[in-house]
Amino acid sequence: MALKVLIIDDSPVLRIMLSEMLQSLGHTIAGEADCAAAGIKAFRELKPDLVTLDISLPDENGLQVLEKLRRIDPAARVIVVTGNDQKAVSDKALQLRALGVLHKPFDGVELAAMLEKAAKR
């Protein structure tokens, strides 16, 4: 099942990489945002099937953004993307019902497995 994905990440390079990976796996990019405020606005407007959400954003922590997305849509499907390998970050993301946590650097196989899990929900 093809998903409409919103990418929220402050790194232009990672947004391009994720976009290309997602499209190569048959998914559509609903939109991109480079900060928390733009990401929340895009989420409300675009109503994506899935969000990839960076933890380190310039204006707000990604976990705080995830909490806000939950308030907007408790069923939102979110994959957290992070370069932070602290277990506490992953645990908190999973407590907030993220579908999973992708640790940078990740590859297409890891992303595909996470997307398969997302498509089933």
Image (spheres, rainbow, N blue to C red):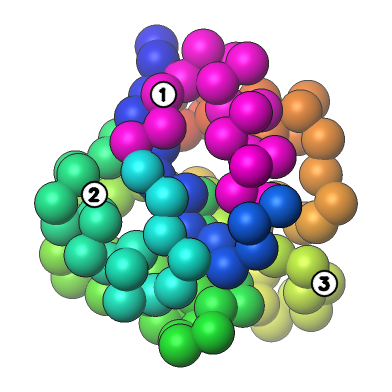
Identify the secondary structure beneath mark 3.
Answer: loop
Q: Nearer the viewer, residue 88 or 68?
A: 68
Disc 1 marks a residue whose amino acid type is Thr
- Residue 27 relative to residue 113: left or right: left
Most frequent secondary structure within the magenta stretch: helix
Instruction: Name the spot of residue 4 as percent of width and height, x first.
Output: 34, 29
Is residue 67 among what the camera can see? no
Identify the secondary structure beneath mark 1.
Answer: strand
The CA distance from mark 1 to mark 3 is 29 Å
Which residue position holds label 2?
75
Residue occupying the point 18% across, 70% down: 71
Disc 2 to disc 3: CB gap under 8 Å: no
State which mark lies toward you, 1 or 3.
1
Q: Give the magenta range.
A: 14-30
Identify the secondary structure beneath mark 2.
Answer: loop
Label 1 neighbour load within 10 Å: few <14, some 14-19, many 20+: some
Disc sitting over residue 85 in the figure: 3
Which residue position holds label 1?
28
Rendered position, 58 above or below 65: below
User: Where is the N terminus found, in terms of image quarters?
Assistant: top left
Is residue 63 among what the camera can see? yes
Residue occupying the point 42% across, 50% down: 32
The CA distance from mark 2 to mark 3 is 26 Å
